[in-house]
Amino acid sequence: MIDTGAMREEQRQKALDIVLEDPPQGLLPHYIAGADVGFEQGGEITRAAIVVLRYPSLELVEYQIARIATTMPYIPGLLSFRECPALFAAWQQLQQHPDLLMIDGQGIAHPRRLGVASHFGLMIDVPTIGVAKSRLCGHFLPLGDDVGATQALWDQDEQIGWVWRSKRRCNPLFISPGQGISLASSLYWVKQLSRGYRLPEPTRWADAVASNRPAFQRWQRLSGNL
């Protein structure tokens, strides 16, 4: 029996530990990672992929994929409890831990301010950013159609993230700090790591690895990793 009330209270308590400031020494990453989580075999298996890119070249230097038995069903608002075990399994396999991690999901743009990027960021104590393809909560002013159009994402009177159009004729991204990074830097780094696709390079590569997309297959051939 899953005690959802206790899990929501745990989210509220963990959210109190989130730091929405950049590291005191500044954020000067040498390695930046992206993470993507999906489900296989009708949801029985949770698959997490983490890629590590060298910065500023954005060369793919390492990737790890973990597949573990899914530990809980899908419950709206509690997705991080479902995804974090596989993310941590993939994280433990990494030889090169990054200085910054982007996760396909929410950071503080969550009703209890603990999306997967915040939850996992607290677990690993690394600055994290949530880069989500859809809105979970909050409201924003109408967004322009031009590339780079930006609006603040608000929940009542609190800013919880950004809405940013990364590519024309594509739905915008919902960007929010996860842990150990400021609102302003979250948007800055997503922009800094975008190369004309809808997704920034770290999560684009994580998706490519997780789904064995052609870009990843080409990288394998060229690098001799097939």
Image (cartoon, rainbow, N blue to C red):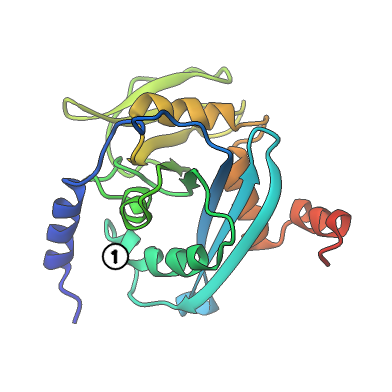
Query: In the rendered view, would you say 36 is above or below 100?
Result: below
Which residue does the image show at 42% across and 36% down from the upper left? Answer: 174
Secondary structure of residue under mark 1: loop
Quarter of the image with the N terminus in it: bottom left
Quarter of the image with the C terminus in it: bottom right
Q: Nearer the viewer, residue 29 or 15?
A: 29
Quadrant assignment, res 180: top left
Q: Looking at the image, can residue 18 be seen?
A: yes
Q: Looking at the image, can residue 143 be seen?
A: no
Residue 65 vs residue 174: left or right? Answer: right
Quadrant assignment, res 158: top left
Which residue does the image show at 48% across and 49% down from the upper left? Answer: 104
Query: In the rendered view, would you say 139 is above or below 129?
Result: above
Q: Dot 1: within a 10 Å radius of its alpha carbon, few (fewer than 14), some, or many (20 or more) residues?
A: few
What residue sits right under mark 1 in the picture? 75
Residue 95 vs residue 83: left or right? Answer: right
Which residue does the image show at 49% across and 43% down from the upper left? Answer: 99
Q: Position of residue 59 (x, y in %)?
A: 72, 43
Q: Nearer the viewer, residue 144 or 226?
A: 226
Give the amino acid type for the residue marked by disc 1 in the picture.
Answer: Ile
